[in-house]
Amino acid sequence: MELLIDDANVAEIQRIYEFYPIDGVTTNPSILAKSGRPPFEVLKEIRSILGTEPQLHVQAVAGDAEGMIEDAHCIVKELPGNTFVKIPAVPEGFKAIKQLTKEGIRTTATAIYTPLQGFLAAKSGASYAAPYINRIDNMGYDGIAVARTIHDIFQQNGLPTKLLAASFKNSQQVLELCRYGVGASTVAPAVIDGMVNNAAIDSAIRVFEADFRELTGQDSMSKL
Ligand code: G3P
């Protein structure tokens, strides 16, 4: 499973990208709005932190297919590299995804709440399909089950689209999809930190350090 950062806070992206094995960054208009800064300024800073190889997913904001296609042209021109254009999985979006696929522009179908949205996005040619795990849970349905069903639909139908699960509130949700072998998950920095935020882990490491200091009077093998 690929692991991406779902955020547009440049300092946080830099920190997480330095320490964790990260495959890219996803954003959406709401995430960009939180930065309070010009979108392309923020996105270019994120691209420069990542370099050209890791993925950057940026959402089209127009409401119709023609506008989404124009947004997509603008996004890939302004942000060269391994960039994917997020397009909502609705009829205007499917039309845009089909056209962009013909043009060789890669897309991530987003705002997915149902398995058949994922199926239609994949048939339209999307590279990724992004179900919103926590938001589905909050509607009284099972977000993990929806994600698994979409993953199964792709596998059973030989569709090359990968699942890109989004909207996580805790690391347990990420674990369940990792165990299922989905294509990718995009996760907020706090939830990524939560994967290793554990007093038992910290305590074990402190004991190793103390035992080594007691044995050698040093805090590094390089000082022996
Ligand atoms: O891009 C979709 C994802 O970021 C939604 O996450 O936490 O706003 O439900 P959330």
Image (spheres, rainbow, N blue to C red):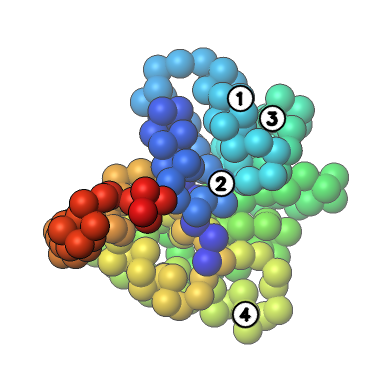
Q: Is residue 17 visible?
A: yes
Left or right position of 175 against 79: left
**Of callouts 1 and 3, the N-terminal one:** 1
Question: Which-is-in-front pick, marks 4 and 3?
Answer: 3
Report which residue position mark 2 lands on: 24
In the rendered image, residue 53, in percent from the top left (x then y), is placed at 69, 44
Q: Examine the rendered structure and indicate whether residue 22 appears above or below residue 75.
A: below
Amino acid residing under circle 1 = Lys
Q: CA distance from mark 2 to mark 1?
A: 14 Å
Q: CA distance from mark 1 to mark 4?
A: 35 Å
Amino acid residing under circle 4 = Gln
Left or right position of 97 against 176: right
Question: Which-is-in-front pick, marks 1 and 4?
Answer: 1
Report which residue position mark 1 lands on: 44
Q: Nearer the viewer, residue 89 or 109?
A: 109
Residue at x 51%, y 70% (from the top left corner): 182
Residue at x 58%, y 77% (from the top left corner): 153
Alpha-carbon neighbours of circle 3 within 10 Å: few (<14), some, or many (≥20)?
some
Q: CA distance from mark 4 to mark 3?
A: 31 Å
Q: CA distance from mark 2 to mark 4?
A: 24 Å
Q: Examine the rendered structure and indicate whether residue 156 appears above or below residue 205.
A: below
In the rendered image, residue 180, in percent from the top left (x then y), is placed at 45, 78
**Of callouts 4 and 3, the N-terminal one:** 3
Say which mark, if any, is on residue 155: 4
Amino acid residing under circle 3 = Leu
In the rendered image, residue 5, in percent from the top left (x then y), is placed at 46, 45
